[in-house]
């Protein structure tokens, strides 16, 4: 695991967001900290505010009040340009599906993350190739167009892209919803294993309670006031994934 | 990075992009083509005659006189007396005079009866004089000097024999078959109606019309003349003549004198003023054409914007991915603008190529059919500015989808649901 600063991976203080529109909405979280390598399962039904939470945690939308720190560095409130740069460098995102830009090759899709973080170099390309190999995507696929891959392969490319910059956080937005049960389990194991290797903290969003078993901590959207809760049952599984 | 993304994105959507590019290419080629034709036609037009102070013909409008005397188009309302031509050309203020007798043709090309002064004094373009590509000027009757286009199109060489026809149509039923002319000279190309003219001496015009009555061959026996007699033939009438004056200051005074000439109703025109008036008439058509082309171009640009807008829905996910990997909203704005820029630039490039190719192919046809010598390179002083303005307009219109992408990326963030 690469050396990380001696700060929590994610730190929320006085987290509050409100939207004053036709459908007024507010989101408030108690203060919380996630240490490096701690993975959080965010569980909630549709319409519970998961999407808004993701946009806030990834710095797309500004907080109304409060602070978000990543490895001790202030992420919110910050100017949009700074948030964009920090997102490129410190946060990886894996979507539910269609994670890849169809007209780019597999390798170019992965390297996108480095481009916007301003770190494209020979070493980055090597690292991208190493990640792809580790995720079971052989070299013959790297130059292929992303559309030629299966859904499972595409999701693995998405993980490679999300972890390329060795980010502090990996935000996964229901990435297993398009996978069958076997592939889903394999995918989560692979993702957590690679995240552990990179020292990345995973925020995994899903409505599927069954997946909670892979995580140490849980945040329920219907019980936000409770903050993050330990998932004792998962600890053994998590430990087994640790490198 | 953005350039690579734009390039690959355009390649990915190459079907629709190609159609957009095609429509823009045609529109830009039309715009540049019309602009080029307008300027080249104007250049060719205004350089048709230069250094001539007055053109004199039978009483008529100045445009009619200009058309038949300079452009060899249409017919004179009447002939003018050769005697009066001699009288006026011997005016102390007149430096030189070029007589012109029109009315015959050779395979659609106008025949002009004149004298050696035509080759000595006639000027076109920037005071350029006529020069011979081959041979020399006629020195006796039944000799002909061909314009460059006539020789090229009909494949004539020095020494070839040609037959003149009476009248100016492409097909004539009255030919001077018994009096063939020998080609003794071929003029170098001038890009003016001179290239499409067949030049013979005034004596030759008289010789082929010997025995004619009322513009038709007479029924009596045609008189046989020896060479000396032929050389001594003196024309009775002319169609027009050009005058060069010793002093430009005298131009208006001489013009008035000719216009008030008691012995015969004559019209003297200033070629520059008449050319400007004629061009002014054509300018209205030219402006209309430009306007229509501009509208076609705007329609094509709107088409491009529509294509980009239509693609936006399917590109929402792409934008979300780019945002997720750290792309800033203004970078997404630039990405779309870059695509607009690439399409527009490619269209401009293809339009220029298309136009150069078309002009290179059409050049001989335009030259032979319309007397327009058009450069194959559609580039003028203002072309760069015109293309820059076009590019700016494309980017301005392209800002609509770009701005919508920017707004959408701010509002939707990472959460596009398909």
Image (spheres, helix red, strand yellow):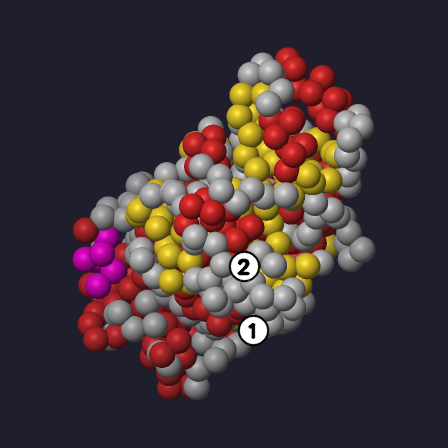
Per the image, label 2 sits on a secondary structure element best described as loop
Label 2: how many Cα within 10 Å (few below 14, some 14–19, many 20+): few
The circle drawn on residue A2 is: none
- Asked if the magenta segment contains residue A127, the reply would be yes
The chain letter for the residue carrying disc 2 is B
Q: Are marks 1 and 2 in contact (CB under 8 Å)?
A: no
Tell me the quarter of the picture where residue B48 sits. top right
Residue B240 percent location from the top left of the image: 64, 40
The chain letter for the residue carrying disc 1 is A
Position of the C terminus of chain A by quadrant: bottom left
Identify which residue is drawn at 22% across, 56% down.
Answer: A125
The residue identified by callout 2 is B223
Q: Disc 1 to disc 2, how far (Cα)?
A: 116 Å
Label 1: how many Cα within 10 Å (few below 14, some 14–19, many 20+): some
Main secondary structure type of the part rendered in magenta: helix
Identify which residue is drawn at 65% across, 15% down.
Answer: B250
Per the image, label 1 sits on a secondary structure element best described as loop
Up-down: is B281 above or below A173? above
The residue identified by callout 1 is A207
Identify which residue is drawn at 65% across, 68% down.
Answer: B219
Residue B270 percent location from the top left of the image: 67, 29
The magenta stretch is: A124-129
- Asked if the magenta segment contains residue B418, the reply would be no
Position of the N terminus of chain A by quadrant: bottom left
Residue B408 percent location from the top left of the image: 62, 54
Q: Are marks 1 and 2 on the same chain?
A: no
Tell me the quarter of the picture where residue B41 sits. top right
């Amino acid at each position: 695991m690469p050396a990380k600063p001696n700060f929590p991976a994610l730190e929320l203080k006085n987290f509050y967001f409100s939207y004053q529109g036709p459908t007024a909405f507010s989101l408030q979280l108690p203060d919380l900290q996630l240490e490096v390598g701690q993975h959080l399962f965010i569980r909630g039904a549709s319409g519970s505010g998961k999407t808004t939470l993701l946009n806030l945690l990834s710095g797309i939308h500004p907080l109304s009040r409060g602070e978000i720190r990543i490895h001790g560095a202030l992420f919110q409130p910050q100017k949009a340009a700074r948030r964009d740069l920090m997102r490129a460098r410190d946060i990886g995102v894996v979507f539910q599906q269609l994670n890849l830009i169809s007209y780019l090759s597999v390798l170019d899709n992965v390297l996108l993350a480095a481009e916007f973080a301003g770190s494209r170099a020979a070493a980055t390309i090597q690292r991208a190739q190493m990640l792809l190999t580790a995720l079971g995507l052989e070299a013959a696929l790297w130059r292929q167009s992303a559309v030629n891959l299966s859904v499972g392969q595409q999701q693995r490319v998405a993980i490679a892209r999300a972890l390329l910059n060795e980010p502090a956080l990996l935000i996964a937005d229901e990435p297993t919803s398009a996978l069958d049960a076997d592939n889903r389990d394999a995918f989560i194991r692979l993702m957590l294993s690679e995240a552990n290797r990179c020292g990345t903290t995973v925020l995994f969003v899903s409505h599927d309670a069954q997946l909670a078993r892979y995580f140490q901590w849980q945040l329920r959207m219907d019980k936000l006031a409770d903050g993050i809760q330990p998932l004792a049952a998962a600890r053994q599984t998590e430990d087994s994934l640790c490198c | 990075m953005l350039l690579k993304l734009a390039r690959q994105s355009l390649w990915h959507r190459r079907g629709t992009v190609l159609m957009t590019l095609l429509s823009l290419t045609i529109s830009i080629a039309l715009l540049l083509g019309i602009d080029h034709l307008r300027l080249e036609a104007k250049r060719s037009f205004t350089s048709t005659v230069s250094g001539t102070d007055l053109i004199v013909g039978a009483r008529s409008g100045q445009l009619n006189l200009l058309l038949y005397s300079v452009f060899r188009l249409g017919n004179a309302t009447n002939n003018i007396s050769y005697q009066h031509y001699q009288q006026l050309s011997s005016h102390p203020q007149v430096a030189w005079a070029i007589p012109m007798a029109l009315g015959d043709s050779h395979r659609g090309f106008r025949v002009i009866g004149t004298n050696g002064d035509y080759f000595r004094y006639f000027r076109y373009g920037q005071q350029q004089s006529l020069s011979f590509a081959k041979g020399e000027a006629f020195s006796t009757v039944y000799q002909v000097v061909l314009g460059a286009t006539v020789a090229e199109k009909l494949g004539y060489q020095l020494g070839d024999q040609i037959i003149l026809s009476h009248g100016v149509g492409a097909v004539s039923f009255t030919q001077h078959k018994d009096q063939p002319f020998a080609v003794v000279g071929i003029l170098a190309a001038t890009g003016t109606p001179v290239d499409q003219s067949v030049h013979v001496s005034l004596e030759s015009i008289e010789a082929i019309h010997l025995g004619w009555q009322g513009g038709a061959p007479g029924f009596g026996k045609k008189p046989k003349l020896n060479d000396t007699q032929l050389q001594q033939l003196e024309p009775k009438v002319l169609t027009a003549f050009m005058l060069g004056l010793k002093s430009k200051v005298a131009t208006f005074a001489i013009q008035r004198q000719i216009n008030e000439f008691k012995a015969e109703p004559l019209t003297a025109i200033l070629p520059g003023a008449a050319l400007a008036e004629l061009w002014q008439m054509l300018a209205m058509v030219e402006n209309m054409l430009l306007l229509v082309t501009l509208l076609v171009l705007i329609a094509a640009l709107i088409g491009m914007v529509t294509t980009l807008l239509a693609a936006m829905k399917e590109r929402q996910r792409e934008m979300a991915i780019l945002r997720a990997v750290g792309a800033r909203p203004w970078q997404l704005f630039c990405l779309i603008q870059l695509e607009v820029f690439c399409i527009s630039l490619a269209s401009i490039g293809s339009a220029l190529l298309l136009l150069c190719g078309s002009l290179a192919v059409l050049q001989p046809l335009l030259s032979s059919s319309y007397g327009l010598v058009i450069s194959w390179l559609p580039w003028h002083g203002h072309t760069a500015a015109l293309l820059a303005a076009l590019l700016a307009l494309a980017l301005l219109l392209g800002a609509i989808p770009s701005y919508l992408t920017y707004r959408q990326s701010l509002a939707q963030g990472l959460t596009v649901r398909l």
